[in-house]
Image: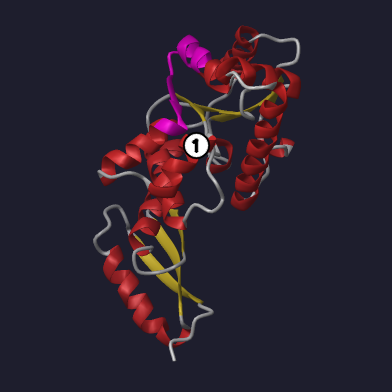
Amino acid sequence: MSIITVSRDSYSHGAEIAKKVAQELGYECIGSDSVVQSVQDKLNEPFGLLKSSIEVNKTISAVASRKDMAYYRSAFYDTMLSDNVVYHGLAGHLFLSEIPNVIKVRLVADMEDRVSEMVRRIKISPEEAQRRIRIEDAKRHELDSSLGTATDENSSFDMSVNLHNMDVDRAAQIIVDAARILKTESAESMQSVLSDLALASHIEIALLDKFSDVRANVRDGRAYIQVEASIVQEEAAARMAMRILADIEGIQEAHVGVMASSFVPF
């Protein structure tokens, strides 16, 4: 079992290259839109800020709510539990930064080539295309910074593929070759870590109905959770959180702490 994440700036042939890699390796190819659809299927309703951000901007704004992000991470990790995936889209290299058997690829394209691609697709002037691309780049950087790592930091990726003087077929083949020589670790270990991350997201979704801020960390089914509440309500908040957690499948044991809220209810 292995996963390949393909990160790129807009109009850098990321989806096209990801599809070619997946086809060559016999993997499933998944983008942000597929994950959003998975969330919508579970909610049976439009997916708020996250859905509109991806549709309009092909990225997600850092203003999306914590619950939107929790829903997205939950669907993302549930999807990654499938065998052999090529993912292109929102923050894959960040969500999978500590996961074994993941190749995190960064595609780099010249601005001139990206402008030409945008002009070809949506028939606007080169000047307007460059303006829009710079706005999208700023939004992507804002998101990655809010999640902890900017996309231009080389340490976030296992390999960088420069598309200057290279067509998409050659770029895809380089990634395929790297995947074939990757020394994979235990598939069970990977599944375990992904399951813990998915469970942490499920916990955050459930608790964010009652708390404005929630941080969940899960290791081998043991959940360590912090919720935000007034310090004078600490015991009541912890009891409420534990009642909610009792209905979540997969938690072996739970530990709840309370973060001090700036709001004082008197």
Residue 226 relative to residue 78: left or right? right
Secondary structure type for disc 1? helix
User: What is the x, y in percent for residue 45?
Assistant: 28, 45
Q: Residue at position x 58%, y 37% from top? A: 93
In the displayed structure, 247 sits above or below 48; it is below
**Residue numbers of the magenta segment:** 19-33
Residue 160 appears in the picture as rendered: yes
Q: Main secondary structure of the magenta part?
A: helix
Q: In which quarter of the image is residue 193?
A: top left
Tell me the quarter of the image containing the C terminus: bottom left
x, y percentage for residue 28?
Answer: 41, 21
Magenta-drawn stretch contains 28: yes
Considering the image in quadrants, where does the N terminus appear?
top left
Q: Give, as a three-letter code, the residue at label 1.
A: Val
Image height check: is 20 above or below 126? above
| 109 sits left or right of 46 in the view | right
Classify residue 206 by image quadrant: bottom left
Give the residue drawn at x 39%, y 31%: 34
Give the camera-side residue of 236 and 55.
55
Q: Mark 1 points at which residue?
A: 56
Q: State the image quarter where residue 212 is shown.
A: bottom left
- In the rendered view, tell whether residue 234 sits above or below residue 71: below
Residue 192, horizontal then vertical, whole percent:
41, 42
